[in-house]
């Protein structure tokens, strides 16, 4: 079985996760991680080059292909490397605070967006198996399930903006 | 005036260079630098993400846009970072030996290709000004001027192969 740890440098090849809109999040008990991420390029073949700053750490992720042939490579960058590349993401960025909330053996990642996406809050839950995903009972403060809605990928939010709010 | 040094981490924004095919190169007096370069992605908007190993140093270059609005960012990578990303370039690589040959106040970069491009030799000369470029007299061992031929960019050679030799 694959290593399913999620430490930002060692993602599993296949993620099983669900995603929900949130209109009235609970008051978080822990402080968030500040995340800035931007997309260098999103090719028509699905290639994605993403830069991310999470607190004081810096990452670059490349994803190619789709489905089973998807290859993902992530490296940690120094701050200097990140700063040199970050201008390449101008106009294709999201800024958000991420709260991690333990919930019935899972962890809810609550993303509170800022900047152009101010007001948008999305909760993501990652699962070890499809069974766990199917049997998951969302807390009552979760809104619409947007797991299958491509407009709510971070990549789409960064490039296209918030769905239904073309500005 | 811009810094025109060419030290692999500080390229000028605009390069003035000419490129020639070579069928019968002179015997080089110095040993070459071994270059492996591969393209992560080449987007329809002109975005290019290139990895390069030159001897024992490793680089990633991102180029976006075209013409005057072209932005280029290059960072040096550690070997570990390079190794983690290199698989993303599979099928879009060139391998070559680069000889640097002083010639009348310029430096000729003589690229001897290997692998799928074995037999191809290209000479490049970079100039400080358009005047220098126009008044350049090629040595008699230079062949066709392919400066304007897009099939002879390294990126095209890596992806499309050698012109006229579809295999």
Image (cartoon, coloured by chain):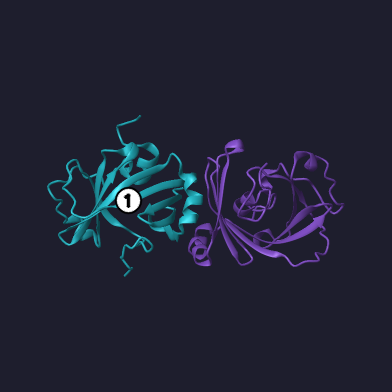
Chain colours: A purple, B cyan
**Quick check: can you spot residue A69?**
yes
Q: In which quarter of the image is residue B101?
A: bottom left
According to the picture, the residue beneath numbered tag 1 turns out to be: B34
Relative image position of residue B104 (x, y in whole percent): 15, 59
The single residue placed furthest to the left in the displayed view is B140
In the displayed structure, A149 sits above or below A6; it is: above
From this view, report whether residue B21 is shown above or below residue A26: above
Please name the residue shown 87% across and 52% down the image: A140
Residue projecting furthest to the right: A140
Question: Which percent across, then down, holds residue A166?
Answer: 65, 52
Q: Mark 1 packing: few (<14 Cα in 10 Å), some, or many (20+)?
A: some
User: Residue at horizontal 66%, vertical 48%?
Assistant: A153
Residue toward you, B71 or B41: B41
x%, y% of residue A121? 74, 57
Q: What element carries label 1?
A: strand
The image quarter in which residue B2 lies:
bottom left
Res B16 quadrant in image:
bottom left
Left or right, residue B3 beside residue A27 = left
- Frontmost residue, B166 versus A16: A16
- Kindly identify the residue that appears in the image at 34 percent across and 50 percent down: B35
Q: Mark 1 lies on which chain?
A: B
């Amino acid at each position: 079985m694959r290593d399913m740890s999620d430490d930002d440098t060692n993602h599993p090849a296949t993620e099983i996760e669900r995603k929900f809109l949130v209109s009235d999040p609970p008051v978080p008990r822990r402080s968030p991680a500040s995340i800035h991420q931007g997309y260098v390029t999103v090719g028509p073949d699905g290639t994605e080059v993403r830069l991310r700053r999470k607190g004081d750490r810096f990452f670059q992720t490349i994803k190619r292909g789709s489905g089973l042939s998807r290859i993902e490579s992530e490296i940690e960058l120094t701050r200097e490397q990140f700063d040199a590349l970050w201008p390449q993401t101008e106009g294709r960025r999201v800024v958000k605070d991420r709260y991690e909330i333990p919930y019935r053996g899972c962890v809810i990642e609550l993303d509170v967006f800022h900047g152009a996406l101010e007001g948008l809050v999305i909760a993501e839950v990652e699962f070890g198996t499809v069974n766990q995903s199917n049997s998951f009972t969302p807390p009552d403060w979760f809104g619409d399930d947007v797991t299958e809605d491509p407009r709510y990928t971070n990549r789409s939010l960064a490039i296209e903006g918030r769905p239904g709010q073309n500005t």
